[in-house]
Amino acid sequence: GENVEQHPSTLSVQEGDSAVIKCTYSDSASNYFPWYKQELGKRPQLIIDIRSNVGEKKDQRIAVTLNKTAKHFSLHITETQPEDSAVYFCAASSRNNNDMRFGAGTRLTVKP
Amino acid sequence: GAGVSQSPSNKVTEKGKDVELRCDPISGHTALYWYRQSLGQGLEFLIYFQGNSAPDKSGLPNDRFSAERPEGSISTLTIQRTQQEDSAVYLCASSLDGSAGDLGQYFGPGTRLTVT
């Protein structure tokens, strides 16, 4: 089955700096890669996703890149703000069976 | 429209008792997932339902855990003879069928289970 690894486990940046979170996956059949943001005490929320036919996707200050050959994908947050502080989870799934496996999460702290 | 709902929001039970947690997915979503999240930890996959197919139970930690989705909509997660290590937030998520455009999972607010 799929195995997703996520790094780093914690990340602290200064407000305005960029933050990068990286994930690797094991199943070459995986073709859908979402990212979730979970604020303290709240449910995970889908913030951006990418499919395997695309190398990069942007949404305002958030971007995700995918390297299918290397089986890794990354989340990039630019111009970070204190409200970006949360735990971020990456995930991978196969379109065929629609199961999804999550990384262990990255706790991002943006210091004002 | 309405999102994923879960009930109860909080449940405190004594060790050894059985509990039932309920999830009502987004209307039209055929896939339903249960996860467990211990304090400060990641999302632990428990079970996955897709339409009328046999569920993927590979994440259930032991035979005290079971789940049903009898009519393809609402799901119930049952934990028998609860133990203190079962204390966690149980999250339900739903998504459209894999053949549709949007594969994103949408989470409910969770049920916080405390076993005393």
Image: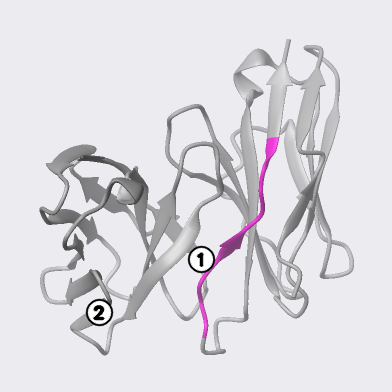
Nearer the observer, B116 or A4: B116
Disc 1 and disc 2 on one polypeptide chain: yes
In the structure shown, which secondary structural element does the residue marked by tag 2 occupy? Answer: strand
Figure check: A85 above or below A57: above
Percent position (x, y) of residue B28? 75, 80
Give the residue at x 72% y 16%.
Answer: B115
Percent position (x, y) of residue A83? 35, 49
- Write down the chain letter for disc 1: A
Which residue range is magenta in the image? Answer: B102-111
Q: Residues within 10 Å of mark 1 (few under 14, many from 20)?
A: many
Quadrant holding the C terminus of chain B: top right
Nearer the observer, B60 or A39: A39
Q: Is residue B21 visible?
A: yes
Residue type indicated by callout 1? Asp
Percent position (x, y) of residue B92? 66, 52
Nearer the observer, A8 or B57: A8
**Which residue is label 2 attached to?**
A58
Give the residue at x 81% y 12%.
Answer: B14
Picture colour scheme: one colour
Of the numbered discs 1 and 2, the one sitting upstream in the chain is: 2
**Which residue is label 1 attached to?**
A99
The reply to whether the magenta stretch includes residue B104 is yes
Percent position (x, y) of residue A49? 36, 74
| Left or right: A61, with A46 as reference point | left
